[in-house]
Amino acid sequence: MSMRSTVSASVLAGAVATALGGFHPGGPLRDLGIVTVAAASVLFIVNSFLIAIVVAVFVTAPREAQAVVTGPVTDDRALTIAAAHCIACHSTKPTNPNFARPPKGVVLETTDELRRHATQIKQQAVLGRAMPLGNVTRMTDMERAELGVWVEGGK
Ligand code: HEC
């Protein structure tokens, strides 16, 4: 529903209500009726405006930005991302106290290791969000997208 159609609907409703008020029997009662209908119409219009504003704000609110990687992603960049978000658990000697060994034997400390697990990395951290586990390191959408570009050949 657009703001314009809301406004014209409320104006129309107001006009109909006022016209109906005009057919009210004469005397003080009639005046009271017109006043009541007019007040109701004003309230209706004000309400419609408020609703229209809320709808407009909702519709035009910025969505969560889709991360778009504009440049190439180098091996170094992929390593930096893995170092920041993966190797606390996925290294030969994890620093995360919950892991004495790299989970599932997946070590992500070198470019070769990243390449070896490229398909899994894409599934776990780019297409899905299973990794980093619980997103403990708060990996961003941009970092996920970058990792995805790197997996696909860095371009
Ligand atoms: C807090 C610890 C932790 C962090 C950080 C972490 N992982 Fe994991 N990862 C795990 C655990 C635990 C498993 C085993 C999950 C299971 O048993 O299904 C796992 C499994 C995996 C697997 C193997 C999944 C499979 O079954 O094929 C891949 C690949 C992986 N992680 C990639 C990553 C990547 C990439 C990152 C960084 C972006 C990352 N992980 C960060 C804990 C972690």
Image (cartoon, rainbow, N blue to C red):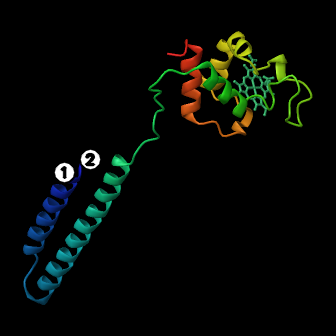
Looking at the image, residue 67 sits to the left or right of residue 91; the answer is left
On whether ligand 1 comes within 8 Å of the CB at mark 2, the answer is no
- Image marks 2 and 1: residues in contact by CB distance under 8 Å: yes
Q: Position of residue 115 (x, y in %)?
A: 68, 12
Reply above or below: 63 against 84.
Answer: below
Which of these two is toward me, 118 or 93? Answer: 93
Q: Position of residue 65 (x, y in %)?
A: 45, 38
Of the residues shown, which amino acid type is indicated by label 2? Met
Kindly indicate the quadrant of the structure image that contains residue 36. bottom left
Residue at 27% x, 61% y: name it.
Answer: 48
**Under tag 2, what secondary structure?**
loop
Q: Which mark is residue 104?
A: none
Name the residue carrying label 2: 1
Of the residues shown, which amino acid type is indicated by label 1? Ser
**CA separation, marks 2 and 1?**
7 Å
Reply above or below: 122 against 33.
Answer: above
Q: Position of residue 39 (x, y in %)?
A: 21, 77
Name the residue carrying label 1: 5
